[in-house]
Image (spheres, rainbow, N blue to C red):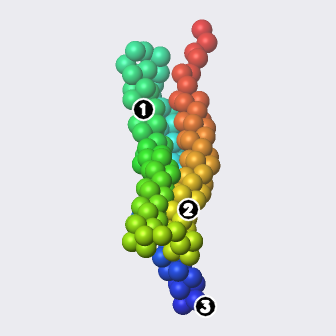
């Protein structure tokens, strides 16, 4: 079963050319980063959020300039933690279609080389090059589309979590 899947993957990757292996590596890296972010949002960030809120509630004085500066620094720290790796994921999303286009260009160069070597029009010899040109484009676009959807979800989760943290670090209004 696994051997059959491996052979099918190798066959598909061979039809797409070497650029397809780079797109696969970028997909794997993107998934690792996305899974890490999802785990952090669901398991790790709550610890930082509770610690910041407890530290803020433990402060005797919350309305001075100094207290607001500390609150701002803590919120900036939380925002940095929430946004970690999102820029790298965004970069991978942008690079995937470009790599797909690189695969298209290299595939078309292969088609033209085949035509030049044969010195005549041969549809069978062109088919391999056209396949090598279209598969990386499709793969790059699919990976980028998936990345855009997941990145949008991660961005919204980060914004919601930061808003919750900001709400938890509000100044206590002391009534006279």
| Foreground: disc 3 or disc 2 | 2
Q: Is residue 171 left or right of residue 95?
A: right
Q: CA distance from mark 2 to mark 1?
A: 44 Å
Mark closest to the chain's N terminus, 3 or 2? 3
Q: Going 48% across and 53% down the picture, which residue do you hit?
A: 101
Q: Disc number at residue 134? A: 2
| Foreground: disc 2 or disc 1 | 2
Give the labeled residue for mark 1: 76
Residue 101 sits above or below residue 134 on the image: above
Q: Secondary structure at mark 1?
A: helix
Given residues 70 and 129, the one toward you in this image is 129
Give the labeled residue for mark 3: 1
Q: CA distance from mark 3 to mark 2?
A: 28 Å
Mark closest to the chain's N terminus, 3 or 1? 3
**Farthest top residue in view:** 176
Residue 139 sits above or below residue 11 on the image: above
Given residues 49 and 152, the one toward you in this image is 152
Q: Going 46% across and 42% down the picture, which residue do you hit?
A: 83
Q: Secondary structure at mark 3?
A: loop
């Amino acid at each position: 079963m696994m051997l059959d899947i491996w052979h099918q993957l190798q066959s598909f990757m061979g039809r797409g050319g070497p650029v397809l292996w780079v797109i696969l590596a970028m997909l794997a890296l993107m998934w690792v980063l996305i899974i890490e972010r999802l785990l952090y949002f669901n398991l790790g960030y709550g610890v930082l959020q509770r610690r910041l809120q407890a530290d803020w509630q433990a402060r005797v004085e919350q309305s001075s300039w100094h207290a607001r500066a500390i609150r701002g620094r803590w919120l900036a720290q939380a925002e940095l933690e929430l946004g970690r790796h999102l820029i790298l994921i965004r970069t991978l999303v942008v690079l995937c279609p470009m790599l797909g286009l690189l695969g298209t260009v290299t595939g078309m160069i292969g088609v033209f080389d085949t035509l030049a070597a044969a010195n005549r029009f041969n549809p069978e010899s062109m088919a391999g090059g056209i396949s090598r040109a279209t598969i990386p484009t499709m793969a790059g676009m699919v990976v980028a589309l998936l990345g855009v959807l997941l990145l949008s979800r991660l961005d919204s989760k980060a914004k919601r979590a930061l808003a919750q943290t900001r709400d938890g670090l509000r100044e206590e209004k002391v009534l006279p």
